[in-house]
């Protein structure tokens, strides 16, 4: 049962011995632990150490309204100690979660998890915090005495906890997938489809410094190999060999780039042999402007001249992508993301109309009948505990039930459309990228649907000769905040920047959580034909060097968070590559 303690410790919580003893006596202690952690982190700030004692545990049970209302929490010395004690006011509107399906949600509600556009950066006024040093719950717990004679108070409390878990575990409403349209009307179709990269079950990191070094070394090796094919960098200098006054060309990683007091740009440039400061002179306007688009941890090539102790760059060389030759396409692909099933703002009618169209039920438009593949780039559901006060915007407050509802919708799609489904930051996969495929334990009915491919985030697939990178898009957050002139609204330019860097999320240690795997799976190894992203809820399309850059928007209207930050989503718009030509189909008139 050490795993119980580890679960709380991972979330910055310590528990009293009394709480530990009560939890381990339950029928399903681990399930109850996950549910309790989820509720605490939904309600209280994640930035403080949280002390869980027996009084709070009983208060939590009272919130669920599942024990007798005679069991109240009162101040044990309200008359004598009112000036010395403060009590927590518990919000009875906290969502009820079903722990049966949340037994590994610690990855989703990690203290390091960020919602779209850094949603967890709400101000302290927006969060109710529990500080054990200044607040405490009363110790006068009144237990219902209408019990079987001979039962002691501990037996009563333990039985109550088990009754709660049993009641909650029966709340999931599973549906019979064998009877859904997709599974009962199977059509044999030939697919030329292959998964090129899927990182599910390929996580070997232990989170140690040595893993981080291997991670960056792998990134450097991959991108150096690409850069060394450029004519200017066929024989690059190692940084340790750039001595005296000399011209140089070299490959390295950016470490700390900033503007000097004289208005120039300067950065530390590093390879495996050493580090050198590089200056971008403000009088070289084009180069200076380009240097403002560089970010930390990006790997590039540089050409320049060293004069004494100062190296001045004259050219920036990106890994980049070659122009892609136009290929014939005799089928169609539909692209969606950020559906957010389970949200009060989910556009259920628009999504249903989209399904009807691709099923060929719209006689006015034959495009839908031609769709052979449907790619979903993450956030199929809205998730649980992703950002503060999310529960107030949820129609379905259980993660497993959200996936059940998602399966009902996808189960209505004709079976000869291959569905390729990856996770996003709202899904029940781990938060850190690369994310593994949505786990079957949370989405059992989805896994029972015919002709669905579950992939990681990011993933690379070959669709009948079209190399397709599927990436949810958390890397947009760092790039939009770091690069001058960039924003989430300009995500087509952000996708172009990703291709120039040949990396989806280069900045380590900022908004986008990255796992230091032994291999950097966010490097774009091969030039794609299609880059499909989501996350920012804003549709964009650009044809760059023959590559289709597609952001598929959302099926969720504006959330409260987006209103505060003046983000206007383009909801209910579905991009389709219809036999190689880009088209947009609109299913919502509120944009």
Image: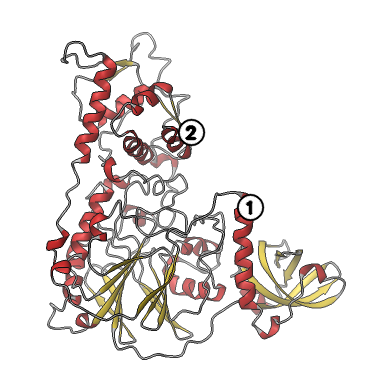
Residue 524 seen from this side: yes
Q: Nearer the viewer, residue 273 or 476?
A: 273
Position of the N terminus, as image quadrant, is: top left
**Residue 251, horizontal then vertical, whole percent:** 69, 72
Is residue 566 toward the left or the right of residue 396 in the image?
A: right
Q: Nearer the viewer, residue 370 or 135?
A: 370
Q: Nearer the viewer, residue 63 or 467?
A: 467
Disc nearest the viewer among 1 and 2: 1
**Residue 339, horizontal then vertical, whole percent:** 28, 62
Using the image, tell me which numbered label, if any, was put on residue 364: none
Q: Quadrant of residue 234?
A: bottom right
Position of the C terminus, as image quadrant, is: bottom left
Q: Quadrant of residue 43?
A: top left
SS for tag 2?
loop
**How many residues crowd mark 1 within 10 Å: few (<14), some (14–19), many (20+)?**
few
Give the residue drawn at x 40%, y 90%. Answer: 327
**Residue for badge 2:** 49
**Residue for badge 1:** 210
Is residue 300 toward the left or the right of residue 121 in the image?
A: right
Q: In the rendered view, tell whether residue 20 sits above or below residue 411.
A: above
**Residue 117, horizontal then vertical, whole percent:** 43, 57
Q: In the rendered view, tell whether residue 254 sits above or below residue 320.
A: above
């Amino acid at each position: 049962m050490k795993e119980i303690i580890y679960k709380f410790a991972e979330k910055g919580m310590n528990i009293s011995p009394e709480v530990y003893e009560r939890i381990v006596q339950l029928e399903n202690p681990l399930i109850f632990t996950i549910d309790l952690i989820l509720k605490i982190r939904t309600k209280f700030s994640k930035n403080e150490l949280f002390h869980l004692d027996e009084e709070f545990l009983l208060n939590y049970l009272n919130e669920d309204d599942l024990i007798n209302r005679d069991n109240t929490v009162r101040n044990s010395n309200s008359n004598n100690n009112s000036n010395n004690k403060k009590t927590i006011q518990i919000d009875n509107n906290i969502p009820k979660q079903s722990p049966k399906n949340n037994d590994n949600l610690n990855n989703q509600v990690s203290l390091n998890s960020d919602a779209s556009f850094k949603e967890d950066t709400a101000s302290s006024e927006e969060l109710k915090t529990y500080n054990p040093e200044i607040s405490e719950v009363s110790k006068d717990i009144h237990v219902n005495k209408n019990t079987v004679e001979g039962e002691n108070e501990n037996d009563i409390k333990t039985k109550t906890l088990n009754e709660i878990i049993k009641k909650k575990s029966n709340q999931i409403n599973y549906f019979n997938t064998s009877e859904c349209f997709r599974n009962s009307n199977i059509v044999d179709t030939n697919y030329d489809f292959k998964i090129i990269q899927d990182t599910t079950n390929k996580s070997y990191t232990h989170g140690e410094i040595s893993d981080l070094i291997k991670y960056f070394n792998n990134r450097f090796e991959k991108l150096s190999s690409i850069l060394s094919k450029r004519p200017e960098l066929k024989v690059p200098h190692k940084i340790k060999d750039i001595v005296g006054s000399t011209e140089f060309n070299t490959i390295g990683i950016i470490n700390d780039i900033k503007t000097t007091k004289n208005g120039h740009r300067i950065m530390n440039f590093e390879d495996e042999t050493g580090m050198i400061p590089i200056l971008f002179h403000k009088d070289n306007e084009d180069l200076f402007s380009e240097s403002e688009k560089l970010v930390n941890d990006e790997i590039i090539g540089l050409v320049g001249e060293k004069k004494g102790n100062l190296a001045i760059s004259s050219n920036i060389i990106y890994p980049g992508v070659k122009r892609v030759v136009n290929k014939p396409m005799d089928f169609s692909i539909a692209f969606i993301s950020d559906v957010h099933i389970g949200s009060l703002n989910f556009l259920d009618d628009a999504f249903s109309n989209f399904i009807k169209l691709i099923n060929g039920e719209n006689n006015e438009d034959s495009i839908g009948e031609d769709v052979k593949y449907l790619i979903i780039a993450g956030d199929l559901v809205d998730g649980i505990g992703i950002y503060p006060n999310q529960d107030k915007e949820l129609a379905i407050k259980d993660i497993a039930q959200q996936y059940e509802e998602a399966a009902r919708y996808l189960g209505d799609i004709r079976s000869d459309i291959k569905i390729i489904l990856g996770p996003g930051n709202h899904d029940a996969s781990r938060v850190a990228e690369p994310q593994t495929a949505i786990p079957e334990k949370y989405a059992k009915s989805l896994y029972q649907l015919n002709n669905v491919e579950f992939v990681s985030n990011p993933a690379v697939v070959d669709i009948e000769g079209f190399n397709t990178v599927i990436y949810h898009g958390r890397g947009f957050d760092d790039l939009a905040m770091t690069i001058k002139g960039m924003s989430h609204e300009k995500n087509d330019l952000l996708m172009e920047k990703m291709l120039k860097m040949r990396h989806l999320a280069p900045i380590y240690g900022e908004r986008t959580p990255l796992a230091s795997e032994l291999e950097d799976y966010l490097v774009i190894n091969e030039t794609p034909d299609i880059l499909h992203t989501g996350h920012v809820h804003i549709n964009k399309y650009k044809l760059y060097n023959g590559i289709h850059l597609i952001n598929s928007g959302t099926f969720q209207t504006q959330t409260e968070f987006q209103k505060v930050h003046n983000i206007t989503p383009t909801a209910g718009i579905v991009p389709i590559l219809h036999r190689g030509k880009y088209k947009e189909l609109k299913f919502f008139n509120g944009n």
